[in-house]
Structure formats: structure tokens, C-alpha cells
Image (cartoon, coloured by chain):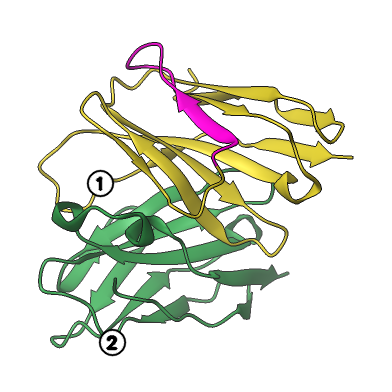
Amino acid sequence: DTAVSQTPKYLVTQMGNDKSIKCEQNLGHDTMYWYKQDSKKFLKIMFSYNNKELIINETVPNRFSPKSPDKAHLNLHINSLELGDSAVYFCASSPETSSPQETQYFGPGTRLLVL
Amino acid sequence: LAKTTQPISMDSYEGQEVNITCSHNNIATNDYITWYQQFPSQGPRFIIQGYKTKVTNEVASLFIPADRKSSTLSLPRVSLSDTAVYYCLVGDRANFGNEKLTFGTGTRLTIIP
């Protein structure tokens, strides 16, 4: 069973379009994340979310918005896509444990190409 | 944030033990050290986590000296399937902040037959 899944795996679209990437986790975790991995392979967090709060990386444009219909899902909506949005987007989740640093479980990634 | 520094790349032959060192000079008292592995076209995968001294699991060992300003991930008898990028991450859940969850450049490990 896939622990963290994302759809679609590949997404090719035109500049200016609006798109969504879906993420689902079946681990019963309380916290979910979205990361962006650029062409240089830097992996940077965009959002983290649990049922208590949404933490936004202030460097993320407001064209990006996470939406969580329930605890098992955190979808990423992107408005007015730009060329620079081309990257691999990873969803991740972690348990709400007492561990000092949460262990994150990552999805397989969504490869977005904006033309 | 305890910033980390790792070698950009390393090569090793199959069957060898590989040690990847991560520097984190300004690690805080509450920070733990976590290592992730990422294969091409996949998301990162948790390998090991530790606070001090030595931690060992079925995949790797993690050595942390007393000053905790560095850590070494040790992979015993590597195989071709260990070719991946290895990330060192340092942080503290209590000081939850976005910078904590930014992975560094990682170390690209290539295993040679």
C-alpha cells in the first residue's frame, strides 16, 4: 500500500493556467507538507499543515495555496502558472509524536513543466 | 537554524564501507540530526536519526561526536542500489520553522561496480 501518494505524476501545462496537485496519506499522520525541488535539486518547504495551523514559507508566492479537505489530504493549487514554477513538487507527512524531530514520509513527486 | 554542509559528491566501489560527514557547527541543544536518502525520480526516504554518540539500524550507522558539530553517516558494504543523494538535516520540533525544513544540497553518492 502506498503511504503517501500524489497525482498526477507528470503535469505539462501552459503559462497562465491554473492547476492542482493532489496528495493523500494513509498513515494516519497529523501533519502534511509540500516541498519544491528545483533544477538544482534544492528541496525547500512551501507549506506545512495540521489540524491546528498552516505554516507558510514567506518566500512562496500567494499564487500557491494548500487546501486540506480532511486530515488525509493536502492538495496544492497553483494559479497563473509561470515558467519558474517548473519543478518537482513533493508531498510529505509526519506523525504528531513526541519525537523531537518529526520523521517525514515523502510521496513520489509530481513533475510540473510550464511551457 | 543549524545550517549543514556536506560534500557535493562521493564515489565508492561496491562492497566498501562509505562514510559521509555533515558539518553543523551551530547546532542547538535541542536539535536532532536526521539523514534522508533520495533516489532519482523519488521522494526522500528517512534513513536514521540521532542526538549523540552512535545510533545503528538495519540500514546504516550514525556517529555523532561529543561536541555534536558534525555527524557521519556510515553505510556498510555498499551496493549499486545505494547510489543516491544523501541529505543531512538538523532541527528541533519545538522551534518549528520553515528554515528547519530546508534540505541542503545533499551528497551524491555513486557506487562503482
Q: Which chain is home to disc 2?
A: B
Residue B79 can be seen, yes or no = no
Residue B20 appears left or right of B94: right
Q: Disc 1 designates what residue?
A: A102
For residue A17, above or below residue B108: above
Q: Position of residue B113 (x, y in %)?
A: 73, 69
Q: Identify the amino acid type marked 1.
A: Glu
Region rendered in magenta: A62-74
For residue A103, above or below residue B16: above
A63 in magenta: yes
Q: Position of residue A97 (x, y in %)?
A: 15, 37
Q: Quadrant of residue A81?
A: top right
In 3D space, how far apart are the residues under numbered discs 1 and 2 (Cα atoms)? Answer: 21 Å
Task: Say which of B48 and A80 sits in front.
Answer: A80
Q: Which chain is yellow?
A: A
Q: Identify the amino acid type marked 2.
A: Asn
| SS class, disc 1 | loop
Q: Disc 2 designates what residue?
A: B25
Task: Say which of B65 and B31 sits in front.
Answer: B31
Q: Position of residue B53 (x, y in %)?
A: 15, 76
What's the mark number on residue B102? none
A9 in magenta: no
**Residue at (44%, 60%) from the top-left corner?**
B102
For residue A35, above or below residue A42: above
